[in-house]
Image: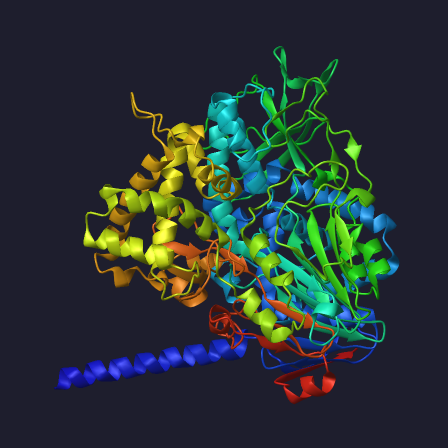
């Protein structure tokens, strides 16, 4: 009994100590949203009102004070995220995390993003309007004031690093980070180049890469290409929890003729990597000079998505192909030279030093040709990667539109927060060169519009930018850029609606624009809604449409596979198989959590892809294909084509397999996989047991920190390429969403003060703060919350007040 009392006493004492520690942490580390501050640099009093979800509503007497205050409150909620994103863009993550992320740093140094963004910022600082530079500097001043006076986030203390102040160049590095979705296109281009070497024209024509029969096949170092693609795909998975990758999106606008209010509407849900903290930080900024309710990226003062009483805009990824890879021919007598049309030319060379926590520095000697940085040896020096591309071998250079210093991306964002109409918005979006973005627009005048905003490359007619090009002769070089008038764009279509879902834009007179466009699944579903006879669209109907989880691809696969499966005795000889087939037949293609057939579909799709493509592609290239953009497009092409050469299994001798053979074999393999995973009770095959939604923090990669920093897992409705787009890797044993809607926004100019939105997790990036994950369950359940812009309502929902005074 005495021993039991001691155990109980120790347990109670431990709990008290833990509770005290949590209490001290919460009071010292979490954001203080009720205080009065004195800040040098302010010219007048600023009030920051926090609503019930931690969104700051900033009221200032001028723009500079407004941005300074915004910098402070943004840093208070997201300082570690700001630091992380600048390090990503600069290739400095190893200073935080050590050797585990050195390859990621080496990639970013090799493609020289920081080198080019610093040049871009220097040029921009020399020519930009003073008001924009003042806004940038005020925002940075606010961040740095918090760094100097506020608490240190827990992540810095766990990692053992100090806080450091920010500069304009750090902001430029984050803009560079926004373009890093280049890694997807780069990996795909390298994979396609390898496939081109060995596959027939007939195979390539069905692959969805715009292949023309008889096109040139440039010889490459296949082993080196395989290395690059393998490392790139590993790096992509590392990046996602650190900042969220720009990958997809839905956006649409409705004319007054189709809405219940008789006013225009805008809807947008950019698809980005799930991370914690979430990608966007919401803030409502008000001064006599401007007002905007916006969604902001860490360390960027100007909203990427925004609305006010005059206009609203949203974004989707254009996914145009703005990168070309060139094979450079090396001088056999001097590895520091390459052939440039008619002469040997010296490489430009720079040296970069990567500081690695707990390790010696890594010194990189980087080269650039006239096309751009040499990327062949991006991962040299690591075990297993030695001398894959020897100095004396031909090298790969990367040409990228983003490298053009004349890229006024920040100015475009600034201008969008101040435009009043379509004409002014057009001037702003012209300044977006890279990354390419679809800008969706609606305004109080009833105008709706869409621009594919990017600097579009003129390429020689014979060039296929999906593969590596000839860098030596000049015949494959870019010819310049098209005028913005050739960019796809629409104003007030007769249909009364327009949309973007990362689909291929129509030809505007320059041919179809090359890109990494997704298949027609979401576009087809969205068009079915918007171009219906419905003329009473309102916010409630839009909420439901954003959550639609029915896939058109399902119906196509059902149409082709069900007749084949029904006739096959090989798949109808067991009760379990017959039950699964009946469920699959009766399924209406929705992705609700309790649905069983949706799990059957994805496992069947996985097996059809593997049985169809893996034998020709090989283990390595198929791994890239299975989780990449290209498989979405290719399955649409091949599943409909009974005579495609892909159906034959080249690993089997003396047999030519048909589509029927592959589908039957895939069904049986699927059935076996589901039995092993979930058992023979088919009720356990529900989608909620197969798919989980989780938001991972960078430190949550290490157990037990995942229990502290990560949010989730949750059950959710949705799937790959449904409107409610929840993307997971087919290659994984467990389906865990790694990207999806980064917000869901609904703006109705008939009720402009009642816009709707949601954040995947919460406003705060500070663990244990009440707004760290207070929206996560709502998001998973498909709920929305108000985005307040009317001051009387903001005051009514006030949960905090910061008053900032000048010195």
User: Can residue 430 be seen here?
Assistant: yes
Q: In which quarter of the image is the N terminus?
A: bottom left
- Residue 668 in picture, x, y percent from top left: 27, 44
Tell whether 468 sits left or right of 436. Answer: left
Is residue 163 at least partly visible in the picture?
A: no
Number of disc labels: 0
Question: Is the residue 344 above or below the residue 718 in the image?
Answer: above
Q: Nearer the viewer, residue 438 or 708?
A: 438
Please state if 564 lies on the left or on the right of 203 as rendered: left
Name the image quarter holding residue 642.
top left
- Chosen colour scheme: rainbow
Is 318 located above or below residue 189 in the figure? below
Q: Position of residue 210 (x, y in %)?
A: 60, 32
Image spot of residue 709 (x, y percent):
45, 65
Q: Quadrant of residue 353?
A: top right
The residue depicted at 86 percent of the width and 58 percent of the height is 423
Residue 652: x %, y % from top left: 30, 25
The answer to which of 86 and 589 lies nearer the viewer is 589
């Amino acid at each position: 009994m005495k021993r039991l009392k001691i155990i109980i006493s120790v347990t109670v004492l431990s709990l008290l100590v833990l509770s005290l520690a949590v209490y001290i942490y919460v009071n010292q580390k979490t954001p203080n949203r009720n205080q009065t501050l004195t800040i040098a640099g302010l010219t007048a009093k600023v009030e920051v009102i926090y609503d019930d979800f931690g969104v700051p509503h900033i009221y200032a007497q001028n723009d500079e004070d407004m941005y300074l205050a915004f910098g402070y409150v943004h840093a208070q909620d997201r300082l570690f995220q700001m630091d992380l994103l600048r390090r990503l863009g600069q290739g400095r993550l190893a200073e935080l995390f050590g050797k585990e992320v050195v390859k990621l740093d080496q990639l970013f140094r090799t493609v020289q993003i920081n080198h080019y963004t610093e040049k871009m910022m220097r040029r921009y600082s020399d020519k930009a309007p003073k008001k924009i530079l003042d806004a940038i500097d005020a925002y940075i001043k606010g961040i740095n004031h918090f760094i100097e006076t506020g608490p240190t986030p827990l992540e810095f203390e766990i990692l053992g690093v100090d806080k450091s102040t920010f500069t304009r160049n750090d902001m430029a590095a984050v803009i560079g980070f926004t373009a890093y979705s280049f890694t997807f296109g780069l990996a795909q281009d390298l994979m396609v180049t390898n496939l081109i070497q060995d596959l027939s024209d007939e195979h390539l024509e069905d692959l969805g890469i715009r292949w023309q029969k008889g096109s040139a096949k440039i010889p490459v170092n296949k082993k080196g290409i395989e290395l690059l693609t393998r490392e790139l795909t590993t790096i992509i998975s590392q990046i996602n929890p650190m900042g969220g990758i720009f990958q997809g999106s839905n956006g649409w606008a409705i004319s007054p003729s189709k809405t219940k209010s008789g006013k225009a509407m805008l809807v947008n849900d950019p698809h980005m990597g799930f991370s914690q903290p979430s990608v966007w930080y919401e803030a409502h900024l008000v001064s006599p000079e401007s007002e905007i309710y916006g969604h902001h990226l860490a360390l960027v003062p100007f909203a990427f998505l925004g609305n006010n009483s005059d206009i609203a805009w949203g974004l989707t990824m254009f996914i145009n192909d703005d990168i070309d890879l060139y094979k450079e021919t090396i001088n056999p007598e001097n590895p520091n030279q390459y052939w440039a049309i008619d002469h040997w030319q010296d490489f430009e060379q720079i040296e970069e030093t990567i500081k690695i926590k707990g390790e010696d520095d890594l010194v990189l000697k980087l080269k650039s040709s006239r096309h751009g940085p040499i990327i062949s040896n991006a991962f040299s020096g690591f075990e297993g990667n030695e001398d894959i591309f020897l100095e004396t071998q031909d090298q790969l250079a990367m040409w990228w539109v983003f490298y053009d210093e004349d890229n006024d991306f920040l100015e475009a964002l600034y201008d969008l927060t101040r435009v009043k109409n379509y004409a002014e918005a057009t001037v702003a979006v012209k300044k977006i060169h890279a990354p390419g973005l679809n800008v969706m627009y609606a305004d109080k005048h009833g105008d709706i519009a869409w621009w594919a905003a990017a600097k579009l490359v003129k390429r020689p007619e014979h060039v296929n930018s999906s593969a590596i090009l000839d860098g030596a002769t000049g015949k494959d070089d870019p010819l310049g850029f098209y005028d913005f008038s050739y960019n796809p764009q629409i104003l007030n279509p007769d249909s009364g609606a327009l949309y973007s879902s990362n689909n291929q834009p129509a030809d505007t007179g320059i041919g179809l624009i090359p890109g990494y466009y997704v298949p027609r699944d979401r576009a087809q579903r969205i068009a079915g809604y918007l171009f219906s006879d419905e003329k009473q669209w309102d916010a409630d109907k839009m909420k439901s449409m954003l959550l639609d989880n029915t896939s058109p691809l399902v119906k196509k696969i059902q149409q082709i596979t069900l007749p084949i499966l029904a006739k096959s005795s090989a798949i109808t000889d067991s009760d379990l198989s017959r039950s699964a087939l009946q469920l699959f037949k009766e399924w209406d293609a929705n992705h609700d959590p309790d649905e069983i057939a949706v799990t059957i579909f994805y496992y069947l799709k996985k097996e059809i892809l593997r049985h169809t493509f893996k034998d020709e592609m090989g283990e390595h290239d198929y791994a890239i294909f299975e989780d990449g953009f290209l498989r979405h497009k290719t399955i649409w092409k091949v599943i409909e084509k009974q005579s495609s050469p892909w159906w034959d299994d080249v690993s089997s001798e003396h047999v030519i397999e048909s589509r029927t053979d592959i589908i039957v074999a895939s069904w049986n393999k699927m059935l076996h996989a589901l039995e092993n995973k979930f058992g023979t009770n088919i009720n356990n095959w529900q989608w909620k047991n197969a798919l989980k939604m989780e938001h991972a923090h960078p430190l949550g990669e290490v157990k037990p920190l995942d229990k502290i920093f990560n949010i989730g897992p949750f059950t959710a409705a949705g799937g790959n390429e449904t409107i409610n787009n929840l993307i997971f890797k087919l290659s994984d044993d467990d389906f865990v969403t790694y990207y999806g809607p980064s917000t869901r926004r609904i703006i109705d100019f008939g009720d402009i003060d009642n816009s709707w939105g949601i954040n995947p997790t919460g406003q705060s990036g500070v663990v244990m703060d009440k707004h760290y994950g207070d929206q996560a369950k709502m998001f998973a359940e498909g709920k929305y919350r108000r985005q307040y812009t009317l001051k009387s309502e903001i005051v009514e929902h006030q949960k905090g007040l910061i008053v900032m005074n000048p010195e």
